Every structure is written in structure tokens, then in C-alpha cells.
Image: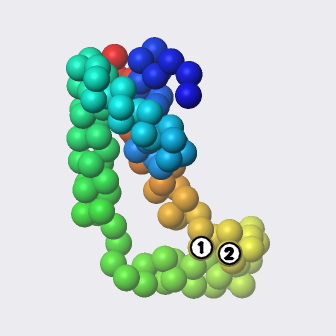
Amino acid sequence: MKDIHAGIEEYVAASIAGMLSAEEEQELRDHVAACPACRAVSDESRKVADLLTSALAAGRPGAGFEEKMAMKVDKKIDEGGVAAAPARRRRFLVPAAAAAALLIAVGVVIAVSD
């Protein structure tokens, strides 16, 4: 890991997203424990990520929503109203879009807090 202090926002965001190796995670934890400024950034970023996760979970559609939507899209395709797309790609689009939105929101919040 390079200079954690200089890139704390990026390291914390990567940690929140689960993108750090076990060794990088430990290095980040060690640095945050020893550096009050970076600990403040980490704590604030994690609080925001938790709030966003809670907000998104509260608004998550009920069980079967994705399957119902996929069936409606399939029906439109059968009727010729939507460009054909592989079913597996459509079924992963909603969760992938939600994950991307969460990562973008965390990045924006981190950038704004600078």
C-alpha cells in the first residue's frame, strides 16, 4: 500500500466497498488507529455509508420484484416493444445499478466532505 495518509479517502472508500486485500485492510486499520485526522475521515465516511445502506435497504422492493419486472420485460420483448437482451443480463441490471449508485453516492459524499 502506498501513502495511506495522502489518499485516505480512496483507501476508506475501497475498504467500505470491500476492495482491499486482508493485508491492505490491516494496514489501513493500523494507520487509522494511529492518526486522528484519518480516523475522523474514516469514521465519517463509514457513518455516511451506513446511512446510505440503511436508506437504500428501507426502499428496497419486496421479494419477487426483480422476477416480476423481468417477466414484464420478457413480455414486452415478445410483443416487440423492447430491444431483445439476454435474460441473465436483465436480471443482474437492477442489483448492479443499485450497487453502482451506492458507490457513486459514497464517493460524492467523501468528495464533498473535503
| Label 1 packing within 10 angstroms: few (<14), some (14-19), many (20+) | some
Name which quarter of the figure residue 30 lies in.
top left
Which residue is identified by label 1?
Answer: 91
Q: Are marks 2 and 1 in contact (CB under 8 Å)?
A: yes
Q: Is residue 60 left or right of residue 2?
A: left
Give the residue displayed 40% in from the left and 44% down from the top: 16
Q: Which residue is mark 2?
A: 88
How is this picture coloured?
A: rainbow
- Three-letter residue code for mark 1: Arg
Image quadrant assignment for residue 83: bottom right
Q: Amino acid at mark 2?
A: Arg
* 21 vs 8: above or below: below
Q: Position of residue 25 (x, y in %)?
A: 45, 41
Element assignment for label 2:
helix
**Residue drawn 57% across the image and 84% down it:** 71
Q: Quadrant of residue 42?
A: top left
Residue that appears at 59% across and 68% down? 92
Q: Nearer the viewer, residue 40 or 96?
A: 40
Give the side of residue 21 with respect to residue 111, left or right. right
Neighbour tally class for label 2: few under 14, some 14-19, many 20 plus, Cα within 10 Å: few
Q: Nearer the viewer, residue 11 or 66?
A: 11
Q: Disc 2 and disc 1: Cα gap in Å?
A: 5 Å
Q: Residue 68 — which label?
A: none
Residue 22 point in image, percent of width and height: 50, 47
Q: Residue at x 47, y 29 (%)?
A: 10
The N terminus sits in image quarter: top right
